[in-house]
Amino acid sequence: AQTVTQSQPEMSVQEAETVTLSCTYDTSESNYYLFWYKQPPSRQMILVIRQEAYKQQNATENRFSVNFQKAAKSFSLKISDSQLGDTAMYFCAFMKFSNDMRFGAGTRLTVKP
Amino acid sequence: DAEITQSPRHKITETGRQVTLACHQTWNHNNMFWYRQDLGHGLRLIHYSYGVQDTNKGEVSDGYSVSRSNTEDLPLTLESAASSQTSVYFCASSARRGSSYNEQFFGPGTRLTVL
């Protein structure tokens, strides 16, 4: 079974600083997808960034970027120029080609003014 | 605009009662999913469907059932509610199986309390 581990239950960062959230996963699959979702206090799940395992280039979406290390099964999220609105729970997720998605336990990020 | 809705948003019920949570999407997506969210566990997959008349068990399916009679709806039924099923439930949908653009779109969630 696939497992996703987020080793940092809580993190904080000063506004405008950079923070990196860690995620590791375990799988025997060669083709899969990785995601980071954000869940603000509203509870809505919002897709932040997506990475296809067959792509070597790290995905980037504005201030959000990932460091995907396939051999190490690592998928960290870097948030640059942190903003107060980035305060949320962040979930790393692994999905097989069949759309079966597994989530990590989450990291609670607080951005301090 | 297309959306995915859940009802009710909050529900309190008693142990042993049957409860049905509704999920409706207007994306015309083939795939629909039910998750539960508990502290320390993230989201865990309960059941999923790849199309009408198709249903599959997920990681934590015991005590839950689903049926898919049309594209838009996937109701989740708790046959006999237990206190361990107190949780926040999310419905999600995605375009098609195996697609490169297989982002799952989530509903707003239903908070269920079983007393």
Image (cartoon, rainbow, N blue to C red):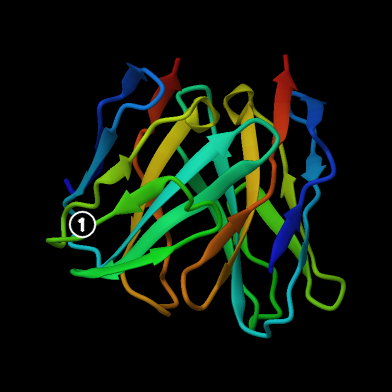
- Most extreme residue toward the left is B70
The kind of residue on which mark 1 rests is: Trp
Q: Which residue is pictured at 80% across the width and 27% down the height?
A: A13
Could you tell me which residue is drawn at 29 percent across and 32 percent down? Answer: B19
Residue sitting at 79 percent across and 38 percent down? A18
In this orientation, which residue lies closer to the viewer: B112 or B81? B81
Work out whether A109 lies above or below A62: above
Q: Which of B54 and A57 is in front in this view?
A: B54
Q: Is residue A68 left or right of residue B26?
A: right
User: What chain is tagged by disc 1?
Assistant: B
- Mark 1 lies on a secondary structure that is loop
**x then y, percent, for residue A59:** 63, 65
Q: In this view, does B78 lie to the left or right of A112?
A: left
Image position of A69 with respect to A101: above or below: below
Between residues A65 and B7, which one lies in front from this camera angle? B7
Q: Residue beneath label 1, please? A: B27
As drawn, A54 above or below A40: below
Figure check: B102 above or below B106: below
Q: Where is residue A7 in the image (x, y as percent from the top left)?
A: 84, 44
Residue B65 horizontal/vertical position (percent)? 34, 51
The residue that appears at 30% across and 42% down in the rendered structure is B77
Give how far across and how far down residue A28 sits, in percent: 74, 81
